[in-house]
Image: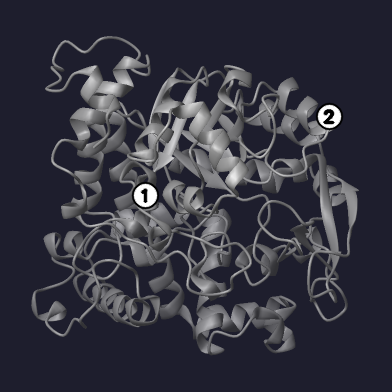
Amino acid sequence: MPLDRSSGILLHPTSLPGPYGIGELGPHARRWIDFLEAARQQLWQLMPLGPTGYGDSPYQCFSAFAGNPYLISIERLVEIDLLTADDLAAAPDLPAGHVDFGAVIPYRTAILVRAFERFVAGARERAAFEAFCAREAYWLDDYALFMALKEVHGGRAWNSWEEGVRSRHPAALSRARRELAATVERQKFWQYLFFDQWLAIRRYANARGIRVIGDIPIFVSFDSADVWANPELFHLGPEVAPTVVAGVPPDHFSKTGQRWGNPLYRWDRLAARGFDWWIARFRSALVFFDVVRLDHFCGFEAYWEIPATEPTAVVGRWVRGPGQALFGALREALGELPIIVEDLGFVTPEVEKLRDDNGFPGMKVLQFAFGGDASHPYQPHNFPRNCVVYTGTHDNNTAVGWYARAPKVERERVRRYLAPGDEGFAWRFLLLAFASVADLALAPLQDVLGLGTEARMNIPGKAAGNWRWRFRWEDIPERLALRLGEVTELYGRVPEPSGGYRSAVTATEAQEGI
């Protein structure tokens, strides 16, 4: 599906400001959308919104359908009388510049338990809650029971539970539903709150001309409701542990590749079922998002299969993926899909054909553009229009951090491509993306602000310490929205002139940087 020439910013909700230790879906999210509107941006891209597990990665979630309850706005719960000022009096001293997950998670869990208790005591919103549970039952029932069982098992992975619930014997599941009824309902209520708040945020963005780009990872976490509820769809051994796992061979990010550890699909079984699970997953994603970024698109054509016993991704083999059969089934069930594909890494002619046959825009990352000569496909003069250019992604260093560490030959190519001098590099790098012919141009907020390595979001292969960065409103220069809006209009990324917009800066000032 073609997308209009436009631009936007990559920022995960956890990185939003706010007083309770982590970004949330309340007033600061709306203020962020107001900033995007003032800056004439039409796209807000974020990472998966699911409930995170070990390592706090949004790419390793307990469900492909659920939302992350830690993003629920505490301020909004106070507004609707599910929390009081007294409930918040014992809040720990949480940092403003990063997420301390070790402190945030127990605090917010206790707060959300209190909100559920008040909901039960007051029986408020019961009809709306029950309607939500009925509408989302196809995934919510399994997810809520899964999370309740994880809680009673001390957080252990599901394949370590007793045989009855591990293997989903009907009698054991019925007993668990009965004994854990209150905990199951609490998990459902938290999802009700998340959906209510997130969909309000999406409506707020859409009303201001901003489309939300969400992320669908190709793989799901082993320790998830998805695998527990559908073990027949994954390569699992007799002990219900993966026999082979996902990853990628050595590439730009890692000399030993990336061993993600996710279980691999039994695509033959999914195909025999008409790809029903994937259709449900896309249908759910399109409730959350206007556009979907499909992570690791290459894996749908061929994926790297790693024996589960291997400690790295060096040893493995390529296995054919579902290819056009999946995307044909999705189109037949859901119509034309607004998809961006993450086609980075080992891109074969077959991957390119699958992408182009479906008209999906691929990604061009400027940080990868200068390791070769003028023929490099990520240099802007080689772009097709139907693509998305990024200064960097959540897996990259920031533009400033990358440039400071790039080999001398790459730095020289960048200087020659942009203009001599290092001052204002991040802003000029952003201008390079915005000026390109790519239909969509996106930059992480860290690059818009010109921040260094200290603001990096993720280091692939690093098990802990990622996903922590947050900004504060005082980090946003006073005239940033005006300058960004000016270059957005200058490079034709506003679909039509806005009668109400009057820039206070000239094009020359905008190009000079913040």
Q: In this figure, which residue is indicated by the disc labeled 2? A: 349
Q: Tell me: 397 left or right of 344.
A: left
* Residue 201, picture quadrant: top left
Mark carried by residue 513? none
Q: Can residue 287 be seen at all in this image of the molecule?
A: yes
Residue at 55% over, 75% down: 54
Q: Residues within 10 Å of mark 2 (few under 14, many from 20)?
A: few
Q: Earlier in the sequence, mark 2 or mark 1?
A: 2
Residue at 50% over, 79% down: 148
Q: Mark 2 belongs to which amino acid?
A: Pro
Q: In this figure, which residue is indicated by the disc labeled 1? A: 446
Q: Can residue 208 be seen at all in this image of the molecule?
A: no
Q: Mark 1 belongs to which amino acid?
A: Gln
Residue 4 appears at what percent x and percent y? 45, 17
In the picture, the quarter occupied by the N terminus is top right
Q: Tell me: 128 left or right of 253.
A: left
Give the secondary structure at mark 1.
helix
Q: State the residue in front, 398 or 314.
A: 398
Give the secondary structure at mark 2.
helix
Residue 297 to residue 497: above or below: below
* Residue 174, picture quadrant: bottom right
